[in-house]
Image (spheres, rainbow, N blue to C red):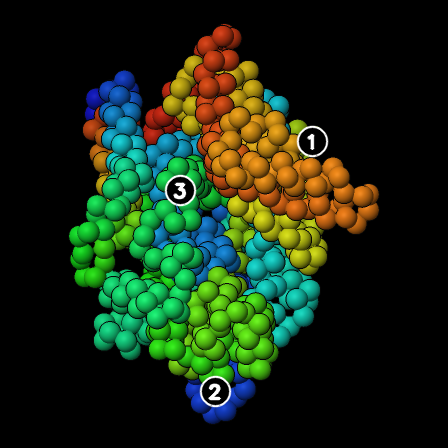
Amino acid sequence: MSSKTTIGGSSFLDNLGKIYMLYTGGFFGFVAILAVLEQMGVPNKWIGYGFVFLTIAVYALIGVLSRTQEVGEYYVAGRTVPSFYNGMATGADWMSGASFVGMAGTLMLLGYDGLAFVLGWTGGYVLVAVLIAPFLRKFGAFTVPDFFSERYGGHFARFLAVLVLISCSFTYVVAQIYATGLIASRFLDMDFTVAVYVGLVGILLCSMLGGMKAVTWTQVAQYIVLIVAYLLPVIILSAKKYGIPVPQLTYGQAIADITALEQSMVAKGLADAKTLKPHIKPFTTYDPLNFFALIFCLMVGTASLPHILMRYFTTPTIREARSSVAWSLFFIFLLYFTAPAYAAFSKLEVFTLIDKGTKLADLPAWMYTYGKIGLVKVCGVDVKAAQDVIAACGKIANHPGVLRWQDLNINTDTIVLSTPEIAGMPYVIAGLVAAGGLAAALSTADGLLLAISNALSHDIYYKMIDPDAPTSRRLIVSRIFLVLVAIAAAYTASTKPADILSMVAWAFSLAAAGIFPALVLGVWWKRANTPGAVLGMILGFATCAYYLVGTRYFAVSFHEMWSWLGTASPAATAKFAELKAAWVAAAPGAAKDAAWLALDKHAQTIASWWGVRNISAALFGLPVGFLTIFIVSLLTPAPSKAVQDMVDATRLPSGDLIMKDKAGMTQVH
Amino acid sequence: MKVNIERHWSRTSTLMWVMMILWAFFSFFIHMFVDTLNTIKILGFPLGYYMAAQGSLIAFVVMLFIFSWKQESIDREEGVAEE
């Protein structure tokens, strides 16, 4: 039982504003102390360690203070989280390490087309609020698969939902733990594997003892750190450059300057007109079909990811579930509408450098800082020593000896990490950014781990295997699964699995195709029945998975089977035939393998249906899912009166929750 | 208070469709005219770029607060709000 004064107790909930204000003030004080220490000559490395270990210690402390022995608190934070704070927690849950560290870099490299991610990762919340969240809250589910089981009659639908949930969440959590390791190893010179396991301990301390309740209150704390860390450097930069500390307004000027510099660089031969993507010009990377398909799939994926949906189970009322989605989007918006400003300022910095004809011997210090860890390359080599760069560029025909845009290769992670240094800010700001990136990765990892382990412990173990399990055993099983999944994810991350990391983008399409149609129709179409939903989930998910795996891992046979639906140019088709012939003719052994690699690599660029990119596979999975549910439901008998009444009750805010937990979850209205 | 469940659901559905149309407008439709909009400049921002970087996002946030408020008043007026 939680006493009044512990975290999550009534006096805690009554004083949330005061507590988190105090926390935020304390955090600023902590930054100030480290800034003073830096001025006194404490080495950067110590400042970095101070940031990382102190913030993780605070999260862990919140996690430990939020320990609970109640099922309702463990799974849905006792349904006591006010909408404003649930909004912050969702913000931290949602914004991953990659969003924090990599998004601005993507926007810098892709220009307008990168905005598909900004749009896709915000607009989905409209779908969450209008179509899904309030109804799931009324349902009173503990997990998303709970809804599928109750609405679509039993274990099979539940089991399918669990499969979809795990397939989209596991790769995602591996990527978060990987990001933790990357940030810690870059900033603290820590061994990557050690950093991964330090992250693991941080994650487990936050979630194991208190489940959703602990994760909620640490995510609020993590949101505050991550948003301060994201906004502060760019606000300082904007104030320094333009005299106005509102980067979201001042970067308009930067964009105008970028456009002018683009023309000047091309005129001076410092950029290649063919490969330079003008910052504001649309459809230079994605054609319109792929641009809009990507936005669509990311949005529907957002509205289907279980670790996001389950956050809305925790509000005290349905009304607050709705307003909580609005707050979530507001808190997410603060980061996403700032990311393009980072991108523009960095691009302006780099373009100015190139336009003034910087000699290869005079590359700025920040390029060396990040070149050393492999994030900045010039003429194909890491920027470590000037003579190496000069030698590498010397091998390029007609190289003018000054830095050109096409010589430069900047890893997308560099932009946010390097901004403090580029703007000449003290190291303490860079440490702050590292702490923010860690907060973003850890908070998302917490939410995902909980979603996976709750599906295993609640849906598979309790609901399907041992429905008579007493509360104490349920809680023990939950924690065992949590630890096992966390260790499995950390181990996978420690092997740096390139394949798994590239699959993260698949999570959105897989979740969208597997979950969205049955979830939305379950509320909005009473006629949707069990055979329709089950087949719709299977076929929608299978279509999506087939497209993802086919175009990525079996591109050659995919292209051969579907070339009539593809959009390969005659030249690309001819090249395919040529490479194929070369592979057939090659002598067995190394030559054959090399020929296959070349063939497969080329096939991956042309294997498609109507030219749709792999990342937008839900564009096919979703219609298949929706149509299957429509057609099969109409061909089979309508759901029973009891199920139809349940749907009616789901639509009404008043009245009792639909599902009740034996273990005595107190109902709150 | 008079409870009218049918009217509650039909008003809720209407609100849903209105939101979906606005969502489609700000997610897709407006960005189809990016080139034309880019000829207009505000504070240095080409308008087409601005809509994708900020405009639509602001619209989504405002939409959700209005939705939340509107659905609440529908619930109340039809007598099905939580107490």
Whether labels 2 and 3 share one chain:
yes
Residue at (35% x, 43% y) in the render? A123
Marks 2,3: beta carbons within 8 A = no
Up-down relation of residue A266 to residue B17 (above or below): below
Q: Circle 2: is it few (<14), some (14-19), or many (20+) Cα within 10 Å?
A: some
Estimate the x, y position of residue A599 in percent, counting from the top left: 65, 42
Residue A415 vs residue A173, the one in the foreground: A415
Residue at (70% x, 30% y) in the render? A465
Quarter of the rendering containing residue A231: bottom left
- The mark closer to the camera, 1 or 2, is 2
Q: Secondary structure at mark 2?
A: helix
Residue at (40% x, 56% y) in the render? A274
Q: Could you say which disc has been placed on residue A466 in the image?
A: 1
Q: Circle 3: is it few (<14), some (14-19), or many (20+) Cα within 10 Å?
A: some
The numbered mark 2 sits on a residue in which chain?
Answer: A
Q: Secondary structure at mark 3?
A: loop
Estimate the x, y position of residue A69 in percent, counting from the top left: 59, 48
Alpha carbon distance from label 1 to label 3: 52 Å
Q: Which residue is mark 2?
A: A37
Up-down relation of residue A502 to residue A630 (above or below): below
Kind of residue at badge 1: Asp
Task: Say which quadrant the C terminus of chain A sits in.
Answer: top left
Estimate the x, y position of residue A658 in percent, counting from the top left: 46, 27
Q: Is residue A457 visible?
A: no
Residue at (58% x, 49% y) in the render? A502
Residue A266 vs residue B23, the one in the foreground: A266
Q: Earlier in the sequence, mark 2 or mark 3?
A: 2
Q: Could you say which disc has been placed on residue A287 in the image?
A: 3
Alpha carbon distance from label 1 to label 2: 56 Å
